[in-house]
Amino acid sequence: MKKWTTLWIMIMMLGVSVPALGAMSISKMRQNTRFLTDRMAYELKLSPQQYDDVYEVNYDFINNVRYLMDDVVRGYDYALERYYDFLDVRNDDLRWILSGSQYRRFLKAEYFYRPIYAQNNKWQFRIYMVYNNVNFFYFGKPHHYASYCGGHYRTHFNNVSYYRTHFHNRYHHDIYDGHYRIRHDRVTYDNHRRRDFQVNVRPPKKDNHRPATPQARPGRRPGRDNNHKHEERPSRREYNSRPDKDRRENRRSVSPKRDSKKENKRNDKNSNQSGGRSATHARTV
Protein backbone atom coordinates (compact mmCIF):
# COMPACT_ATOMS: atom_id res chain seq x y z
CA MET A 1 0.00 0.00 0.00
CA LYS A 2 2.83 2.41 0.81
CA LYS A 3 4.51 1.62 -2.51
CA TRP A 4 1.36 2.52 -4.43
CA THR A 5 0.97 5.72 -2.44
CA THR A 6 4.58 6.73 -3.12
CA LEU A 7 4.20 5.96 -6.82
CA TRP A 8 1.02 8.00 -7.02
CA ILE A 9 2.71 10.98 -5.33
CA MET A 10 5.62 10.80 -7.81
CA ILE A 11 3.21 10.74 -10.77
CA MET A 12 1.37 13.77 -9.43
CA MET A 13 4.66 15.66 -8.97
CA LEU A 14 5.73 14.88 -12.53
CA GLY A 15 2.36 16.00 -13.83
CA VAL A 16 2.78 19.34 -12.10
CA SER A 17 6.43 19.94 -12.96
CA VAL A 18 6.61 18.83 -16.60
CA PRO A 19 4.16 21.42 -18.02
CA ALA A 20 6.08 24.15 -16.19
CA LEU A 21 9.20 23.28 -18.20
CA GLY A 22 7.46 23.98 -21.50
CA ALA A 23 6.92 27.71 -20.90
CA MET A 24 6.91 30.32 -18.18
CA SER A 25 3.93 30.52 -15.89
CA ILE A 26 1.29 33.24 -16.10
CA SER A 27 2.56 34.97 -12.96
CA LYS A 28 6.14 34.94 -14.27
CA MET A 29 4.97 36.24 -17.63
CA ARG A 30 3.12 39.14 -15.99
CA GLN A 31 6.19 39.98 -13.93
CA ASN A 32 8.48 40.06 -16.99
CA THR A 33 5.90 42.10 -18.91
CA ARG A 34 5.63 44.62 -16.12
CA PHE A 35 9.42 44.95 -15.76
CA LEU A 36 9.89 45.57 -19.50
CA THR A 37 7.01 48.06 -19.60
CA ASP A 38 8.23 49.85 -16.48
CA ARG A 39 11.66 50.50 -18.03
CA MET A 40 10.07 51.64 -21.29
CA ALA A 41 7.91 54.07 -19.36
CA TYR A 42 10.98 55.38 -17.50
CA GLU A 43 13.22 55.88 -20.56
CA LEU A 44 10.58 56.94 -23.09
CA LYS A 45 8.64 59.08 -20.57
CA LEU A 46 5.26 57.46 -21.17
CA SER A 47 1.99 58.92 -19.96
CA PRO A 48 -0.30 56.81 -17.73
CA GLN A 49 -2.49 55.95 -20.74
CA GLN A 50 0.55 54.94 -22.78
CA TYR A 51 1.87 52.91 -19.86
CA ASP A 52 -1.30 50.81 -19.70
CA ASP A 53 -1.47 50.32 -23.47
CA VAL A 54 2.20 49.37 -23.78
CA TYR A 55 1.70 46.80 -21.04
CA GLU A 56 -1.08 45.20 -23.09
CA VAL A 57 1.06 45.08 -26.22
CA ASN A 58 4.03 43.56 -24.39
CA TYR A 59 1.76 41.05 -22.69
CA ASP A 60 0.32 39.88 -26.02
CA PHE A 61 3.77 39.49 -27.52
CA ILE A 62 5.27 37.52 -24.64
CA ASN A 63 2.16 35.40 -24.32
CA ASN A 64 2.33 34.45 -28.01
CA VAL A 65 6.02 33.53 -28.08
CA ARG A 66 6.49 31.82 -24.71
CA TYR A 67 5.50 28.38 -26.06
CA LEU A 68 7.59 28.97 -29.17
CA MET A 69 10.94 29.95 -27.71
CA ASP A 70 12.34 26.45 -27.14
CA ASP A 71 12.09 25.74 -30.87
CA VAL A 72 13.45 29.21 -31.66
CA VAL A 73 16.58 28.50 -29.62
CA ARG A 74 17.00 25.17 -31.43
CA GLY A 75 17.02 27.06 -34.71
CA TYR A 76 13.84 25.76 -36.35
CA ASP A 77 12.95 27.96 -39.32
CA TYR A 78 9.20 27.85 -38.73
CA ALA A 79 9.65 28.98 -35.11
CA LEU A 80 11.98 31.83 -36.06
CA GLU A 81 9.61 33.09 -38.71
CA ARG A 82 6.67 32.93 -36.30
CA TYR A 83 8.66 34.72 -33.62
CA TYR A 84 9.56 37.63 -35.87
CA ASP A 85 6.00 37.78 -37.18
CA PHE A 86 4.76 38.31 -33.61
CA LEU A 87 7.53 40.82 -33.00
CA ASP A 88 6.58 42.84 -36.09
CA VAL A 89 2.96 42.88 -34.94
CA ARG A 90 4.03 44.11 -31.52
CA ASN A 91 6.24 46.85 -32.96
CA ASP A 92 3.45 47.89 -35.31
CA ASP A 93 0.99 48.23 -32.41
CA LEU A 94 3.48 50.38 -30.52
CA ARG A 95 3.61 52.84 -33.42
CA TRP A 96 0.06 53.94 -32.61
CA ILE A 97 0.78 54.35 -28.91
CA LEU A 98 4.15 56.09 -28.96
CA SER A 99 4.78 59.45 -30.55
CA GLY A 100 7.22 59.79 -33.44
CA SER A 101 10.09 60.94 -31.20
CA GLN A 102 9.37 58.24 -28.62
CA TYR A 103 9.32 55.57 -31.29
CA ARG A 104 12.69 56.68 -32.68
CA ARG A 105 14.23 56.33 -29.23
CA PHE A 106 12.51 52.97 -28.95
CA LEU A 107 14.16 51.76 -32.18
CA LYS A 108 17.62 52.78 -30.97
CA ALA A 109 17.29 50.73 -27.77
CA GLU A 110 17.92 47.11 -28.76
CA TYR A 111 16.58 45.80 -25.44
CA PHE A 112 13.22 47.44 -26.28
CA TYR A 113 13.06 46.89 -30.04
CA ARG A 114 14.23 43.24 -29.96
CA PRO A 115 13.67 42.29 -26.32
CA ILE A 116 14.60 38.56 -26.40
CA TYR A 117 17.92 36.91 -27.16
CA ALA A 118 19.50 33.46 -26.67
CA GLN A 119 22.73 32.52 -24.93
CA ASN A 120 24.02 29.06 -23.97
CA ASN A 121 20.89 27.47 -25.47
CA LYS A 122 18.65 29.55 -23.21
CA TRP A 123 16.49 32.52 -24.08
CA GLN A 124 16.36 35.62 -21.91
CA PHE A 125 15.17 39.23 -21.87
CA ARG A 126 17.76 41.83 -22.81
CA ILE A 127 16.32 44.33 -20.36
CA TYR A 128 17.88 42.37 -17.46
CA MET A 129 21.34 42.98 -18.96
CA VAL A 130 20.80 46.73 -18.46
CA TYR A 131 18.81 46.72 -15.20
CA ASN A 132 20.01 44.14 -12.71
CA ASN A 133 17.68 44.87 -9.80
CA VAL A 134 14.62 42.84 -10.78
CA ASN A 135 12.71 43.83 -7.63
CA PHE A 136 12.82 47.58 -8.22
CA PHE A 137 10.12 49.37 -10.23
CA TYR A 138 9.83 53.05 -11.10
CA PHE A 139 6.02 52.92 -11.35
CA GLY A 140 3.20 50.94 -9.85
CA LYS A 141 1.36 48.09 -11.51
CA PRO A 142 -0.87 48.85 -14.49
CA HIS A 143 -4.50 49.14 -13.51
CA HIS A 144 -5.32 45.87 -15.36
CA TYR A 145 -2.14 44.04 -14.36
CA ALA A 146 -3.96 40.93 -13.14
CA SER A 147 -7.08 41.13 -15.34
CA TYR A 148 -5.81 41.63 -18.88
CA CYS A 149 -5.72 38.35 -20.84
CA GLY A 150 -5.23 39.39 -24.49
CA GLY A 151 -8.62 40.94 -25.22
CA HIS A 152 -7.13 43.74 -27.33
CA TYR A 153 -5.01 41.57 -29.60
CA ARG A 154 -5.67 42.13 -33.30
CA THR A 155 -7.07 38.64 -33.96
CA HIS A 156 -10.20 39.85 -32.15
CA PHE A 157 -10.51 42.82 -34.55
CA ASN A 158 -10.18 41.24 -38.01
CA ASN A 159 -6.37 41.39 -37.80
CA VAL A 160 -6.41 45.18 -37.53
CA SER A 161 -4.54 46.85 -34.70
CA TYR A 162 -6.89 47.80 -31.87
CA TYR A 163 -4.69 50.80 -31.05
CA ARG A 164 -4.89 52.04 -34.62
CA THR A 165 -8.68 52.04 -34.66
CA HIS A 166 -8.82 53.76 -31.25
CA PHE A 167 -5.91 56.13 -31.85
CA HIS A 168 -7.98 59.29 -32.39
CA ASN A 169 -9.94 58.69 -29.18
CA ARG A 170 -6.79 58.34 -27.09
CA TYR A 171 -3.89 60.24 -28.65
CA HIS A 172 -3.24 63.26 -30.83
CA HIS A 173 0.50 62.97 -31.52
CA ASP A 174 2.31 62.26 -34.77
CA ILE A 175 2.88 58.68 -35.98
CA TYR A 176 6.24 57.22 -36.93
CA ASP A 177 6.06 56.31 -40.62
CA GLY A 178 9.54 54.86 -41.28
CA HIS A 179 10.76 51.27 -41.49
CA TYR A 180 10.18 49.28 -38.33
CA ARG A 181 9.70 45.64 -39.44
CA ILE A 182 12.39 43.07 -38.66
CA ARG A 183 11.43 41.20 -41.83
CA HIS A 184 11.56 44.30 -44.02
CA ASP A 185 14.20 42.66 -46.22
CA ARG A 186 16.18 39.43 -46.20
CA VAL A 187 19.52 40.98 -45.24
CA THR A 188 18.09 42.71 -42.17
CA TYR A 189 16.19 39.60 -41.16
CA ASP A 190 19.28 37.36 -41.40
CA ASN A 191 21.44 39.81 -39.45
CA HIS A 192 18.94 40.03 -36.60
CA ARG A 193 18.59 36.25 -36.49
CA ARG A 194 22.34 35.89 -36.00
CA ARG A 195 22.54 38.57 -33.33
CA ASP A 196 19.45 37.50 -31.43
CA PHE A 197 19.73 33.71 -31.43
CA GLN A 198 23.16 32.90 -32.93
CA VAL A 199 21.49 30.92 -35.69
CA ASN A 200 23.60 30.03 -38.70
CA VAL A 201 21.71 31.36 -41.68
CA ARG A 202 22.01 29.07 -44.68
CA PRO A 203 22.94 30.73 -47.99
CA PRO A 204 20.14 30.92 -50.57
CA LYS A 205 19.96 28.07 -53.02
CA LYS A 206 21.31 28.69 -56.51
CA ASP A 207 18.84 28.62 -59.34
CA ASN A 208 19.02 25.46 -61.39
CA HIS A 209 19.23 26.92 -64.88
CA ARG A 210 18.69 24.55 -67.80
CA PRO A 211 21.52 24.45 -70.36
CA ALA A 212 21.09 26.57 -73.46
CA THR A 213 21.83 23.62 -75.80
CA PRO A 214 20.77 20.03 -75.25
CA GLN A 215 23.50 17.86 -73.86
CA ALA A 216 23.81 14.12 -74.27
CA ARG A 217 23.71 11.97 -71.18
CA PRO A 218 27.03 10.42 -70.16
CA GLY A 219 27.56 6.98 -71.68
CA ARG A 220 25.21 7.56 -74.64
CA ARG A 221 25.88 8.73 -78.17
CA PRO A 222 24.65 12.17 -79.17
CA GLY A 223 21.31 12.08 -80.87
CA ARG A 224 20.18 8.93 -79.05
CA ASP A 225 19.00 10.71 -75.92
CA ASN A 226 15.37 9.92 -75.30
CA ASN A 227 14.70 13.46 -74.16
CA HIS A 228 15.80 14.85 -77.56
CA LYS A 229 14.97 12.01 -79.92
CA HIS A 230 12.70 14.18 -82.07
CA GLU A 231 15.02 17.15 -82.45
CA GLU A 232 16.49 16.09 -85.85
CA ARG A 233 13.07 15.70 -87.47
CA PRO A 234 11.86 18.72 -89.45
CA SER A 235 8.99 20.54 -87.93
CA ARG A 236 5.72 21.27 -89.69
CA ARG A 237 6.78 24.86 -90.06
CA GLU A 238 10.02 23.89 -91.78
CA TYR A 239 8.19 21.41 -94.02
CA ASN A 240 5.76 24.07 -95.18
CA SER A 241 8.40 26.73 -95.81
CA ARG A 242 8.55 28.56 -99.21
CA PRO A 243 11.77 26.87 -100.52
CA ASP A 244 10.32 23.42 -99.83
CA LYS A 245 7.09 24.29 -101.58
CA ASP A 246 8.97 25.55 -104.66
CA ARG A 247 11.09 22.43 -104.70
CA ARG A 248 8.05 20.17 -104.58
CA GLU A 249 6.31 22.13 -107.36
CA ASN A 250 9.42 21.82 -109.57
CA ARG A 251 9.40 18.09 -109.01
CA ARG A 252 5.78 17.90 -110.05
CA SER A 253 6.42 19.98 -113.19
CA VAL A 254 9.44 17.88 -114.19
CA SER A 255 7.86 14.50 -113.55
CA PRO A 256 5.39 14.64 -116.57
CA LYS A 257 8.25 15.37 -118.97
CA ARG A 258 10.17 12.44 -117.64
CA ASP A 259 7.13 10.25 -117.96
CA SER A 260 6.63 11.36 -121.60
CA LYS A 261 10.26 10.59 -122.45
CA LYS A 262 9.90 7.13 -120.93
CA GLU A 263 6.70 6.59 -122.92
CA ASN A 264 8.39 7.57 -126.21
CA LYS A 265 11.26 5.21 -125.51
CA ARG A 266 8.80 2.38 -124.91
CA ASN A 267 6.93 3.18 -128.14
CA ASP A 268 10.17 3.24 -130.19
CA LYS A 269 11.21 -0.03 -128.70
CA ASN A 270 7.87 -1.62 -129.42
CA SER A 271 7.89 -0.30 -132.98
CA ASN A 272 11.34 -1.69 -133.62
CA GLN A 273 10.30 -5.03 -132.27
CA SER A 274 7.14 -5.10 -134.40
CA GLY A 275 9.10 -4.07 -137.52
CA GLY A 276 11.59 -6.84 -137.05
CA ARG A 277 8.84 -9.40 -136.68
CA SER A 278 7.07 -8.26 -139.89
CA ALA A 279 10.33 -8.52 -141.93
CA THR A 280 10.97 -11.99 -140.67
CA HIS A 281 7.42 -12.98 -141.61
CA ALA A 282 7.89 -11.60 -145.14
CA ARG A 283 11.01 -13.68 -145.76
CA THR A 284 9.34 -16.82 -144.70
CA VAL A 285 6.49 -16.25 -147.02
Image (cartoon, grey):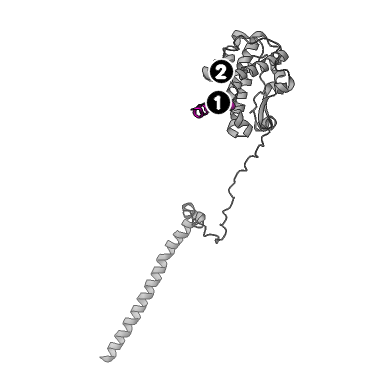
According to the image, label 1 marks what residue?
Answer: 13
Q: Give the range drawn in magenta.
A: 1-21
Q: In this view, does 69 lie to the left or right of 130?
A: left
Q: Residues within 10 Å of mark 1 (few under 14, many from 20)?
A: few
Q: State the residue lying farthest toward the front.
A: 1
Q: Is residue 53 above or below residue 6?
A: above
What is the x, y in percent for residue 30? 61, 17
Asked which secondary structure carries label 1, the reply is: helix
Q: In this view, does 258 lie to the left or right of 95?
A: left
Of the pair 158 and 279, the residue shown nearer to us:
158
Q: In this view, does 281 lie above or below 53?
A: below
Q: Earlier in the sequence, mark 1 or mark 2?
A: 1
Tell me which residue sits at (29%, 85%) in the image.
Answer: 278
Q: How far apart are the two marked residues, 1 and 2, measured between alpha carbons?
A: 35 Å
What is the x, y in percent for residue 228? 51, 55
Residue type at numbered disc 1: Met
User: Please, what is the dominant secondary structure of the magenta stretch?
Assistant: helix
Residue 80 seen by the camera? no
Asked which secondary structure carries label 2, the reply is: loop
What is the x, y in percent for residue 53? 62, 13
* Residue 9 within the magenta-colored segment of the rendering: yes
What is the x, y in percent for residue 23? 59, 25
Tell me which residue sits at (58%, 48%) in the image.
Answer: 210
Q: State the residue lying farthest toward the bottom.
A: 284
According to the image, label 2 marks what residue?
Answer: 153
Tell me which residue sits at (47%, 55%) in the image.
Answer: 239
* Residue 175 within the magenta-colored segment of the rendering: no
Residue 130 seen by the camera? yes
Residue type at numbered disc 2: Tyr
- Quarter-wise, where is residue 43 in the image? top right
